[in-house]
Image (tube, coloured by chain):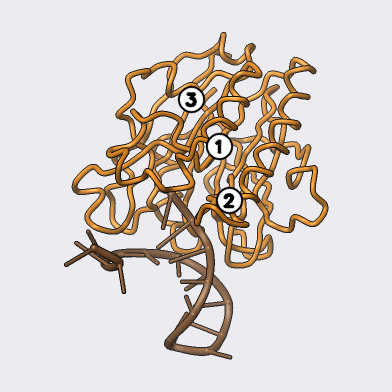
Amino acid sequence: MKIASFNINGIKARLPRLLEWLEETRPTVACLQEIKTQDEGFPAEEFAKIGYHAICHGQKSFNGVAILADGVQPVEVQRGLPGDDADEQSRYLEADVGGVRICNLYLPNGNPQPGPKFDYKLAWMERLRVRLAQHLADELPCVVLGDFNVIPHDSDVWAVKAMADDALMQPQSRDAYMRLLNQGWTDALHTLNPRGGLWTYWDYQAGAWQRDHGFRIDHLLLSPDCADRLVNAGVDKDHRGREKASDHAPVWVELRN
DNA sequence: ATGACTGCCTCTGGCAGA
């Protein structure tokens, strides 16, 4: 099965490109981030027309995540990240599909840092660590994927200097990401491409795409069971270069059935 | 170089993104 993640930066603006990507690459499961719409505005019928069933955790204007599955209904397990009742941002959705627990996340950006947004990011990562520790303890076959808004290594960014003050690569952000991995998760893209230089995001500004000024912030983490089934992982880079593209490219992992 | 673009809702300019 092929499990993919795509930060689409607005489902209304991106719908034609998104449907095109689904039909061309046909992932078994597709996790979306930054749908930027409420549940009422989610175009479930458009996905149904091409054979995808969906669940959605939306929010007006900002954030918002969804899980699509080819030919089956994703069984919703958790809507919103537990651990803070005051948190109203729609950034987490968890479902079972085909015997695999799918944890779709849109981790807070955290800029500017230092400040309350960075504090929120770090607190959110700690809540995530608690949630995912339980899944490992339960030995769930599990894939945790989405826009992590963390550049894990210096080799994951086109220019370290250009991003040095950014929340995406602060030591605290990286430490929190590594604490997560050290629980026992496998970073699929890093494992298959340890030298780095593989980007998943290119800014709209300053000709970043044309100059290949990108970085890797969209990640696919595999539980030990799923890591044993890892066949391949990659980035659908060409989709970033199309008309009216998202600023992220889709990422995917293929697991043996 | 305090630059650059895009999407959203709409106080069509201000905010957010990364």
Percent coordinates x, y for residue A216 in the rendering: 40, 36
From this view, report whether residue A222 is shown above or below residue A149.
Answer: above
What separation in Å lies between label 1 and label 3 (alpha carbons)? 27 Å
Which of the 4 image quarters holds residue A132? top right
Q: Name the residue under label 2.
A: A118
From this view, report whether residue A78 is shown above or below residue A255.
Answer: below
First in sequence: mark 1 vs mark 3: 1
**What's under tag 1, amino acid-wise?**
Gln
Q: The brown chain is which one?
A: B
Q: Residues within 10 Å of mark 2 (few under 14, many from 20)?
A: many
Callout 3: helix, strand or loop? strand
Question: In the current view of this chain or complex, which residue is farthest to the front?
Answer: A114
| Disc nearest the viewer among 1 and 3 | 1
Q: Looking at the image, which is closer to me, A140 or A108?
A: A108
| Disc nearest the viewer among 2 and 3 | 2
For the point 58% across and 42% down, the residue is: A52
Q: Quadrant of the N terminus of chain A?
A: top right
Q: Quadrant of the C terminus of chain A?
A: top right
Q: Mark 1 points at which residue?
A: A172
What separation in Å lies between label 1 and label 2 (alpha carbons)? 10 Å
Chain A painted colour: orange
Q: Looking at the image, which is closer to me, A234 or B17?
A: B17
Q: Mark 2 lies on which chain?
A: A
**What's under tag 2, amino acid-wise?**
Phe
Same chain letter for marks 1 and 2: yes
Whether the residues at callouts 1 and 3 have beta carbons within 8 Å, the answer is no
Callout 2: helix, strand or loop? helix
First in sequence: mark 2 vs mark 3: 2
Percent coordinates x, y for residue A57 in the rendering: 69, 52
**What's under tag 3, amino acid-wise?**
Val
Whether the residues at callouts 1 and 2 have beta carbons within 8 Å, the answer is yes
Which of the 4 image quarters holds residue B10? bottom right
